[in-house]
Amino acid sequence: MMELDHQTDFKDQKSPAMLESGGATADSRNQWKQMGEDKRKIAVQEEMHRMHQLPANSSYAIHRRRVLNKIFQLMTIQRSVSEDEELELLFSGLTI
């Protein structure tokens, strides 16, 4: 039976734009900037609801919920410039 090299599989799927930005493309960053604060919160809440529909022991769902919780936490506090940049990168790295 042939073993798959999963690192190679994932590495090959990333575009140069995603590699340079840490997973976030320019389009996804622009989409985030164009959304209003209310639309951002709604998008995060809808994605959180979708993640709760997945199996509770799914490592993907657990990780995704952690990221969404971090995004929501950063959205609800007064942010520094670095926190605002972190929030932008977290959100743009998601496909919502």
Image (tube, rainbow, N blue to C red):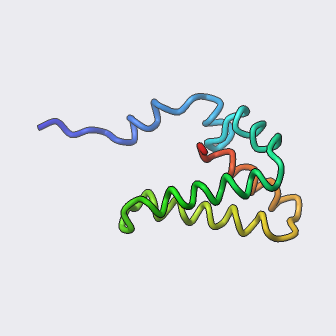
Q: Position of residue 70 (x, y in %)?
A: 66, 66
The number of numbered discs placed on residues in the rendered structure image is 0
Q: Is residue 1 above or below residue 64?
A: above
Q: Position of residue 36 (x, y in %)?
A: 83, 49
Q: Position of residue 75 (x, y in %)?
A: 78, 63
At x 83% / y 59%, what residue is drawn?
82
Residue 90 left/right relative to 1: right
Q: Quadrant of the C terminus?
A: top right
At x 36% / y 67%, what residue is drawn?
57
Q: Position of residue 6 (x, y in %)?
A: 35, 41
Residue 44 left/right relative to 12: right
Q: Quadrant of the N terminus?
A: top left
At x 82% / y 54%, what residue is drawn?
37
Residue 78 left/right relative to 92: right
Which quadrant of the figure has residue 72? bottom right
Camera-nearest residue between 40 and 95: 40
Camera-nearest residue between 12 and 71: 71
Residue, far left: 1
Which quadrant of the figure has residue 87? bottom right
Camera-nearest residue between 14 and 69: 69
